């Protein structure tokens, strides 16, 4: 199949509530990750790497940071005269701001219909992965399925309306929505491919009947009448469903849990910022950490992720923490198991300590 015949749709705000600490002033898509990226970077890059050249980004609220980050789409080669990237407004048809995924689709249906593409590939932003969408699209065409949904086997994330599957081969025979267990299940990554014409028919039908849930009324309700297939993702894929999972997934990068996430053949693109290289003082100590460009380290850093422009003053000790862009840790301060948002200032001699099982969060622009 030719990926240029596929329209990409990215939901930037779905599941914001599960990470409310970080999405209070930004979308899920613009949540910082791994020292220099935003979560939407992985989805956008995967689409571009597969040859998808027309991408719509569905917004809802707090999307100023997202718009600043993705701009015209130039870092992903999506600033084009034809196709390219479009920021889609957060309005459903005649009902104000959309309330759910189905209303969001109804609101952008004219964009989908006018795209000229035969297929639509959907993705959320709360799954950290770098899949080869070519393989997903090829599998969809090979099987002749109506809908193909990427899934992972493991403990189901604690997300509202998440789908779990019972499969016979690769055919989905039963869909359960919103249930979570303690045993491994086949759970949806909310990455799926569907024919544009079929999608339009399903949306019109569901809206006409007053239905409101994409998962229940489009997928689960039609599992017997449509050929819905599962595509198992065996490469790195982690779903963010809470502040704790965000912390655990981020810190897992320090222990090597990022196989298949950063691959030479599937690069992850992001907005380029011109910073100087990281600077280490004479007494600086840094171990097992991701340190972005523009950082100034004069103290001790262990098992940390430091974003661009972070400064660690002399005598400060920072361990097991995530420090976001342009934050400052004062002299002799001690930080352990803390997530600092952007532009946070920790004054000298302050001590903030928590546990890896319950990380502390300090909001944007706060001084402690």
Image (tube, rainbow, N blue to C red):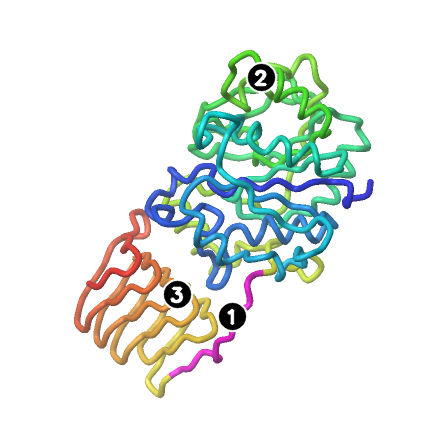
* Residue 279 in magenta stretch: yes
Contact check, label 3 and label 2, Cβ < 8 Å = no
Q: Magenta residues, as a range?
A: 270-280
Mark whose residue sits in front, 3 or 2? 2
Q: Residue at x 55, y 63 (%)?
A: 271
Q: Nearer the viewer, residue 47 or 110?
A: 110
Q: Could you say where residue 255 lies in the image, as x and y percent from the top left?
A: 48, 59
In the image: residue 67, left or right of residue 123: left
Q: Which residue is mark 1?
A: 273
Q: Could you say where residue 190 lies in the image, as x and y percent from the top left?
A: 57, 34
Q: Residues within 10 Å of mark 1 (few under 14, many from 20)?
A: few
Q: Residues within 10 Å of mark 3 (few under 14, many from 20)?
A: many
Q: In the rendered view of the protein, which quadrant contains the C terminus?
A: bottom left
Q: Residue at x 72, y 47 (%)?
A: 52
Q: Nearer the viewer, residue 254 or 163?
A: 163
Q: Could you say where residue 14 lies in the image, as x and y percent from the top left?
A: 47, 37
């Amino acid at each position: 199949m030719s990926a240029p015949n596929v329209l990409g749709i990215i939901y930037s705000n779905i599941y914001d509530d599960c990470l409310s600490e970080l999405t209070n002033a930004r979308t899920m898509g613009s949540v910082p990750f791994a020292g220099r990226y935003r979560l939407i970077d992985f989805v956008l890059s995967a689409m571009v790497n597969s040859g998808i050249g027309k991408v719509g980004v569905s917004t809802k609220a707090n999307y100023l940071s997202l718009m600043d980050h993705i701009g015209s789409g130039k870092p992903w080669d999506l600033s084009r005269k034809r196709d390219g990237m479009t920021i889609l407004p957060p309005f459903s048809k005649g009902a104000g701001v959309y309330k759910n995924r189905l209303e969001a689709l109804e609101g952008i249906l004219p964009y989908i219909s006018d795209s000229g593409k035969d297929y639509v590939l959907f993705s959320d932003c709360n799954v950290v992965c770098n899949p080869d969408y070519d393989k997903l699209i090829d599998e969809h065409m090979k099987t002749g399925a109506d809908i193909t949904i990427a899934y992972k086997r493991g403990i189901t994330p604690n997300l509202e309306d998440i789908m779990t599957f019972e499969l016979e081969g690769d055919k989905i025979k039963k869909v359960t929505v919103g249930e979570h267990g303690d045993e491994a299940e086949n759970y949806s990554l909310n990455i799926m491919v569907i024919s544009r014409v079929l999608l339009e028919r399903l949306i019109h039908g569901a809206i006409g009947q007053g239905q409101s849930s994409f998962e229940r009324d489009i997928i689960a309700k039609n599992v017997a009448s449509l050929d819905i297939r599962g595509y198992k993702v065996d490469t790195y894929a982690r779903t963010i469903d809470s502040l704790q999972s965000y912390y655990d997934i981020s810190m897992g990068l320090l222990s090597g849990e990022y196989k298949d996430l950063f691959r030479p053949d599937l690069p992850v693109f992001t907005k380029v910022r011109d910073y100087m290289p990281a600077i280490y003082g004479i007494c600086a100590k840094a171990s097992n950490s991701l340190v972005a460009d523009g950082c100034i380290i004069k103290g001790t850093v262990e098992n940390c992720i430091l974003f661009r422009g972070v400064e660690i003053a002399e005598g400060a000790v920072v361990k097991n923490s995530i420090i976001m862009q342009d934050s400052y840790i004062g002299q002799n301060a001690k930080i352990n198991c803390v997530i600092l948002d952007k532009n946070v200032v920790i004054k000298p001699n302050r001590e903030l300590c928590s546990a890896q099982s319950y990380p502390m969060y300090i909001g944007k622009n706060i001084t402690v």
